[in-house]
């Protein structure tokens, strides 16, 4: 019987780790049909790079407008679509008979304390669809993905001034607000300032 060399064992371990990483990232692909609080129906599905990129970017623009921050939206549709196709983020779309009514854009981040987790970058529900359960169903879909991937957390940020969203996250979603954590960020000029 031949004993595998250290190099073969190392290569096998690396291959197994790579396979485990890929399997953990396997998407929960399905369309979920849901009846809302008002009796209307929606479908929640995973967005596809290419065909859905334009709709997703429209929701990014709507969110920027809602927050009166359109001037701060530096990303372009072309860059957004390219990054989506490259797998830098994932997204969910919600549709009813009239068309797309909500979206959630998220990606897998990493915590040194908890391991990988989903970070929800943007969630937007059209004003006419708020209060019907659309957001709750989006969060359920994100929770399903988090659980399927073995994550210990699902995380997002909200502007303190967005009191309606903050109230919803605490009251309806029952998420824990982390006031003891302060977010720090370097904008492009700050990044350049630190360069040698």
Image (tube, grey):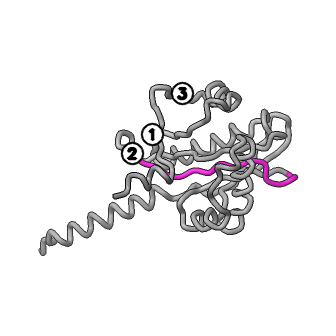
Instruction: Estimate how packed mark 3 is, as few (under 14), some (14 to 19) or many (20 or more) residues with alpha carbons within 10 Å.
Output: few
Question: What range of the chain is rendered magenta?
Answer: 97-110
Q: Earlier in the sequence, mark 1 or mark 3?
A: 1
Q: Residue 135: x percent and y percent?
A: 70, 39
Looking at the image, which is closer to me, 155 or 9? 155
From the image, tell me which residue sits under label 1.
Answer: 152
Instruction: Estimate how packed mark 2 is, as few (under 14), some (14 to 19) or many (20 or more) residues with alpha carbons within 10 Å.
Output: few
Outermost residue on the bottom side: it is 2
Q: Residue at (64%, 49%) from the top-left corner?
A: 72
Tags 1 and 2 in contact by the CB under 8 Å rule? yes
Label 3's element?
loop
Label 2's element?
strand
Q: Residue 115 carries which label?
A: 2
Q: Quadrant of the N terminus?
A: bottom left
Q: Earlier in the sequence, mark 1 or mark 2?
A: 2
Left or right: residue 121 versus residue 93 is left
Q: Which of marks 3 and 2 is nearer the N terminus?
A: 2
Left or right: residue 30 versus residue 129 is left
Left or right: residue 13 versus residue 124 is left
Label 1's element?
loop
**Labels in figure, total:** 3
Q: Does the magenta stretch include residue 166?
A: no
Q: Residue 177 carries which label?
A: 3
Tags 3 and 2 in contact by the CB under 8 Å rule? no
Q: Residue 79: x percent and y percent?
A: 61, 65
Disc 3 and disc 2: Cα gap in Å?
Answer: 20 Å
Disc 1 and disc 2: Cα gap in Å?
Answer: 8 Å
Q: Residue 73: x percent and y percent?
A: 65, 52
Instruction: Estimate how packed mark 1 is, as few (under 14), some (14 to 19) or many (20 or more) residues with alpha carbons within 10 Å.
Output: some
């Amino acid at each position: 019987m031949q004993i595998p060399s250290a190099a073969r064992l190392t290569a096998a371990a690396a291959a197994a780790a790579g396979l485990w990483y890929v399997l953990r990232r396997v998407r929960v692909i399905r369309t979920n049909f849901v009846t809302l609080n008002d009796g209307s129906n929606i479908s929640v599905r995973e967005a596809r790079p290419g065909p859905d990129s334009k709709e997703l970017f429209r929701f990014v623009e709507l969110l920027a407008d809602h927050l009166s921050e359109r001037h701060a939206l530096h990303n372009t549709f072309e860059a957004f679509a390219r990054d989506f196709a490259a797998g830098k983020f994932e997204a969910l779309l919600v549709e009813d008979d009239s068309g797309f009514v909500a979206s959630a854009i998220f990606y897998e981040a990493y915590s040194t304390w908890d391991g990988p987790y989903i970070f929800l970058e943007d969630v937007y529900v059209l004003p006419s669809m708020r209060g019907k359960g659309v957001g709750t169903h989006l969060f359920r879909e994100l929770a399903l993905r988090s659980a399927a991937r073995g994550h210990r957390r699902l995380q997002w940020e909200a502007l303190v001034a967005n009191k309606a969203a903050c109230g919803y996250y605490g009251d309806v979603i029952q998420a824990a607000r982390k006031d003891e954590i302060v977010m720090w960020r370097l904008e492009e000029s700050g990044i350049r300032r630190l360069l040698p």
